[in-house]
Amino acid sequence: MSLNELKAFDAVARAGGFVRAAEMLNRSQPTVTAQVRNLERRYKIELFFRNRGQAARLTPLGERLFETTRQMFNLEGDAEGIIAEAAKMKGGVLRLGAISPRWASGLMDHMMSRYPDLELGLAIDNSQSLLAQVLDYGIDIAFIGAHVFDPSCHMQLVSRPEIAFIAVKDHPLSAHGRITREQFSKATLVNREPGSETRVLMEASMEAHDYRPRRTVGFGNREGALIAAEQGLGLAPTSVEEIPSGANVCVLRAADFSTYGEIHAICLKSRRRLPIIKEAFEQLSASEGGKEPG
């Protein structure tokens, strides 16, 4: 088999189709199709289920081969990255992910200041999704909650944010800033999506102290929960540090408990010593709150 054939296969598997794979590789679509077919014919195997009009779907054998080629070409990308970073990051790329832009903004400012030619990207998602993207080499460094973890990842503590409820600013309890178990039993809880650390931690505290709302409604992500709270639709668990300035909300803390999260920066251990990632973690250590776990 040739390296070009493997690259063609890998690109089709990543892109989900031959046309997009050809664009990724800057080759013609017939060339990519022929290279994959040559690979299949040489070994009398099928790597894709081919259904007209549908995305290219891997066969079980194709999935096994893709696990290997994905690692192989990701490592090739890492090697290219090391060379680029050694040349002052010219043309380098750093892909970040965070549950909120707040946690990544300081690092982004630092890296853009030091390396004007560095290409930076930031994905916003929940902790579970970001961890999956790190494991899949889609993100270099992610800022996530501590409730998700994988032993293949290096973790570094960034912050311990307080988690409380937010409600519309003129809420009857706004002057007190507290909500009791009895008052909470008459309230509507605006919940975050599954995979949110805010939801996981607040639900654990509520369960431990028997805080049960009258009803619960789901508003998906952080932005949806904030809008719902601003509109007076209920109480939304939120990291206090992440409340936007000028938001039409007040903070209500539970009378019987306090809840704190942990935000960690993570990367794959196998990529921890890449120059760009190493410097990023050194900067986090030097900044306030950046601590290596003991």
Image: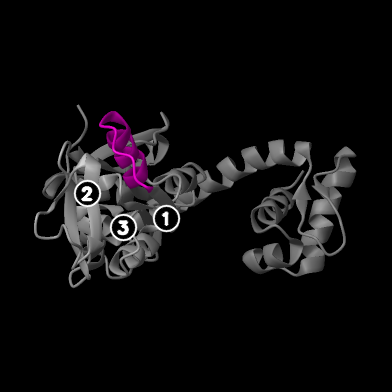
Mark 3 to mark 1 CA distance (whole Å): 8 Å
Q: Do we see residue 92 in this rendering?
A: no
Which mark is first along the chain, 1 or 2?
1
Q: Earlier in the sequence, mark 3 or mark 1?
A: 3
* Label 3, label 2: how far apart the Cα atoms are: 16 Å
Q: Name the residue under label 3.
A: 100
The earlier-in-sequence mark between 3 and 2 is 3
Examine the residues drawn in magenta and state their main secondary structure.
helix
Give the quarter of the image for residue 171.
Answer: bottom left
Image coords of residue 126 (percent x, y): 41, 50
Residue type beneath disc 2: Ala
Circle 1 packing at 10 Å, graded few (<14), some (14-19), many (20+), is many
280 is higher (above) or lower (below) than 59: below
Q: Which amino acid does label 3 sit on?
A: Ser
Residue marked by disc 2: 164
Could you say whether the residue bearing mark 2 is in a helix, strand or loop?
strand
Q: Local crowd at mark 3 within 10 Å, few (<14), some, or many (≥20)?
A: some
**Residue at 36% over, 45% down:** 199
Q: Look at mark 1 in the image and give the residue it sits on.
A: 125
255 is within the stretch colored magenta: no
- Mark 1, secondary structure of its residue: loop
